[in-house]
């Protein structure tokens, strides 16, 4: 299967209810969203175990083509985190940023991409 693309939601001065605009995460194949310099990603872990979220970087630097470390982190059980903004090093060849999920078979994870 392919990654599931996410559409960014515009925030405003009136605020945004993140639980009303989030989408079920594609835990097996991951998600993606179009890169812009100010985008952020909110992830809610509704599971009873922690999960690890990774934003892979396809870029390398220097003469030795050294890999740039991936971004992301751990989200505790029933926790949530806001990631970003993402630098251009996270942009894949197709212009998207990839989101990968790992954990003890997470089942209840939602994600929202915010402008």
Image (spheres, rainbow, N blue to C red):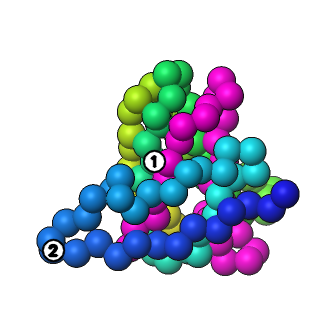
Q: Is 12 placed above or below 106 here?
A: below
Give whichever of discs 2 and 1 has the lower sequence position: 2
Number of numbered callouts drawn = 2
**Mark 2 → mark 1, Cα distance in angstroms:** 21 Å
Query: For this rendering, which residue is in front, 83 or 25?
Result: 25
Left or right, 31 with reference to 29: left
Q: Is 45 placed above or below 30 here?
A: above
Residue at mark 1: 43
Q: Is residue 109 magenta?
A: yes
Q: Is 43 placed above or below 23 here?
A: above
Q: Which residue sits at x=68%, y=28%?
A: 105
- Whether residue 70 is visible to the viewer of this picture, yes or no, is no
Query: For this rendering, which residue is in front, 7 or 108?
Result: 108
Left or right, 108 with reference to 58: left
Residue at mark 2: 13
Q: Which residue sits at x=62%, y=32%?
A: 106
- Displayed quadrant of residue 3: bottom right
Residue extent of the magenta highlight: 90-115
Residue 78: horizontal and vertical position, in percent?
Answer: 41, 29
Q: Is 88 placed above or below 84 here?
A: below
**In which quadrant is the C terminus drawn?**
bottom left
Residue 32: horizontal and vertical position, in percent?
Answer: 64, 64
**In which quadrant is the N terminus drawn?**
bottom right
């Amino acid at each position: 299967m392919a990654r599931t693309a996410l559409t960014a939601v515009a925030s405003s001065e009136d605020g945004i209810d993140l639980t009303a605009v989030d989408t079920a995460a594609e835990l097996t194949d991951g998600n993606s969203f179009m890169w812009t310099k100010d985008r952020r990603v909110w992830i809610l872990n509704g599971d009873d175990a922690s999960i690890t979220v990774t934003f892979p970087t396809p870029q390398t630097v220097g003469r030795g083509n050294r890999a740039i470390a991936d971004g992301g982190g751990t989200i505790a059980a029933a926790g949530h985190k806001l990631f970003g903004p993402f630098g251009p090093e996270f942009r894949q060849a197709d212009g998207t940023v990839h989101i990968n999920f790992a954990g003890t078979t997470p089942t209840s994870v939602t994600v929202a991409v915010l402008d």
